[in-house]
Amino acid sequence: MYLLGYDIGSSFIKASLLDAQTGKLLAAASAPDTEMNMISHQPGWAEQDPGVWWQNAKKATASLKNQGFDLKLIKAIGISYQMHGLVVVDKNKQVLRPSIIWCDSRAVAIGDKAFQELGEEKSLSHFFNSPGNFTASKLKWVKDNEPQLYSQIDKIMLPGDYIAMCLTGEVCSTASGLSEGILWDYQSESPAELLLNYYGISRDLLPKIAPTFAVQGEVTAAIANELGLTAGTPVAYRAGDQPNNAFSLNVLEPGELAATAGTSGVVYGITDQKNYDLKSRVNTFLHVNHQANQPRYGTLLCVNGTGILNRWLKNMVMAEATNGSAYVEMNKLASHAPIGSQGLVTIPYGNGAERSLENKLLGSSVHGLDFNMHTKAHLLRSAQEGIVFALNLGVDVMRGLGVEPKTVRAGDANMFLSPLFSEAFAAITGAVIELYNTDGAQGAARGAGVGAGIYKSTSEAFHGLHTVRTIEPEPQIQTAYKEAYQHWLSCLKKELA
C-alpha cells in the first residue's frame, strides 16, 4: 500500500512514493531535468504557466512507474505547493492567463493602499497581515488591468488547487490556503468579505472550502488511465509549501519551528496566540492542523532571495563542466574564505519585494569588493552569509512576537546541504539545527495518509522519520559571526537610506 505526494515548486515538480505501513520512502522523481523558467515581462514580475506544472507532475509520476512500482497500489495522494500564486479559470476550467506567482511584486501598491484605506488596525485584527502582495491583491491587479479577462473568470485557485483539479476535476481549496492569500477573516473564521468587498471582488470567485486533511476529490477515470493510477484514488491533503514543510518535520505544536532554504528561505513557527507584526514583516496564516476550538497559527518569515541567489552565482561563476556537482564545489570553495569574507558583504534581496523589508524592492548588491584581496571563495561565502543574515533579521522580528528559535527542524536539502550555511545559521540564531531526511513531497504523502484515514493520528504518520544530523551553535565562532552580522546590517541600512 503506497502513498503519493507531490510538491509543486517554482523550480521543479517533485513526486515521492511512501510505503504506508513503514513510512519509508520507496521512490522519488522530479521534473523537468533543468529548473523551470519564470516569465518576467517587467522588473518585479514573475509568472509561470500552470499547464507546465501539470505536464511535469505527469512526467514525475511516469518516472515513478518506470522505476518498477505499480501505481495502482497508491491509496491516497497529497499535494504541497508554492504559496500565494494566483490561477484563474473559466467555466470550462480552462486557464485564462499565466499564474502570477509568489515572488511577483506588481500588487504591492494595491495591497498597501488597501492597508491604509481599510485601516491598519482593522486589517491586522481581521487578516493578521497587510493585504500586501498576496493573492487577493494580485486578483485585484487583474481586475484593474485586464478587465476583459477578469470578466471571464469563474474560479480562482492556488497552485496546489489547480493540480488537484487536474487530477479530480473538482475545484476547491482549504481555509489554510485562503489564509495565505489574505482571503480569510480570523475574527469570523470565514472568507474575508471585508477585503473582497473593498476590492469589488465577488465571493463567488472563491472555490469551495475543504478540510486540509480529508478526501477532497477522487482521481478521474481518464487521468487514472493516463497515469497508471486507480480511478477513485482520493486526493486527501493539500497545503502551501511552508505549512507543509512544517508538517513534514512534525512541527505542529506551539513553540516548534521549521526552516527551509530552497528558492526562497523561510523560518516558520507555530503559536496558539493571535499575534501579528504591526509592520507585516512576518506573516501569520492558519496552520494545517488549525481548528477554531484548538487554534494553530504559523508565523512565517520569508526571504525571497535565497537559493535563487546561489543558483545565479552557479550560472555566473561556475564552469559548465562542473554543473552536475556545482553546488558541492561551491560549498567547498566558500569554506576556504574566513567568517565575514574579509569585509565582503552581499545583500541578497534580488528576487522581488521583500516582506521583511516592508515590501521594499531593494535588489541585490555587493559591498566592499577589493580586487586585490577577494576571490571567488569570498564571493560565494559572502552570498551564503548574506542569506543567513537576512533570515536572522526576520527571526529578530519573530522574537518580538514571542517566537524563540531554540530548536529549528529542517530537511537535509537545498542550502542546508552546505555545512557552512548550517553552521552559520546555528551560530547567528543560537538555535540547535535538526536536519531530517524528508522533503515537501514526502510530507504531502504523509498528510494524504492522515486525510484518507490510513493513519489514525498525525503522530502515526511520522513512523520512519529520523534525524540525519544535528548542528549545535559553536561558542568559539559566534562572536565572529555576530561581528560580521553587524557589518552586514550597516551595509543594509545604507541601501535602505
Image (spheres, grey):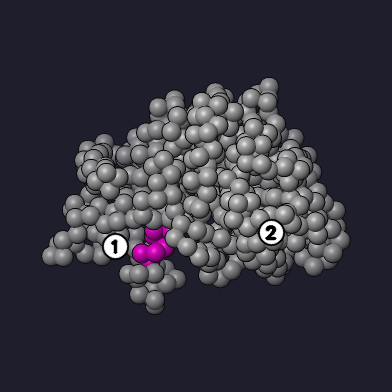
Q: Where is residue 469 in the image (x, y as percent from the top left)?
A: 44, 45
Give the x, y percent position of residue 143. 64, 51
Task: Give the residue at mark 2.
Answer: 148
Screen quadrant of the C terminus = top left
User: Which mark is in front, 1 or 2?
Assistant: 2
Of 446 and 122, which appears nearest the observer? 122
Q: How crowded is mark 1: few (under 14 residues within 10 Å), some or many (20 or more)?
A: some
User: Relative to 15, is 358 on the left or the right?
Assistant: left
Q: Nearer the viewer, residue 368 or 237?
A: 368
Picture layout, residue 307 above or below residue 175: below
Q: Can residue 312 be seen in this view?
A: yes
In the image, the segment drawn in magenta is 306-314
In the rendered image, the residue lying farthest to the left is 372
Residue 150 located left or right of residue 12: right
Q: Main secondary structure of the magenta part?
A: helix
- Mark 2 belongs to which amino acid? Gln
Name the kind of residue labelled 1 in the image: Leu
Secondary structure under tag 2 reads helix
- Marks 1 and 2, how far apart at CA: 53 Å
Residue drawn at the location 40% of the way across and 36% of the way down: 395
Spot occupied by residue 253 in the image (x, y as percentages of width and height): 57, 29
Choose between 384 and 368: the one closer to the eye.
368
Q: Which residue is drawn at 54% across and 38% down?
A: 114
Element assignment for label 1: helix
Going by the image, does 298 lie left or right of 369?
Answer: right
How would you rate the neighbour count of disc 2 (Cα within 10 Å): few for under 14, some for 14-19, many for 20 or more? few
Residue 294 vertical position relative to residue 129 in the rendered view, above or below: above
Q: Horizontal and vertical percent for residue 261?
A: 45, 50
Question: Which residue is identified by label 1?
Answer: 333
Using the image, tell me which numbered label, if any, was put on residue 435. none
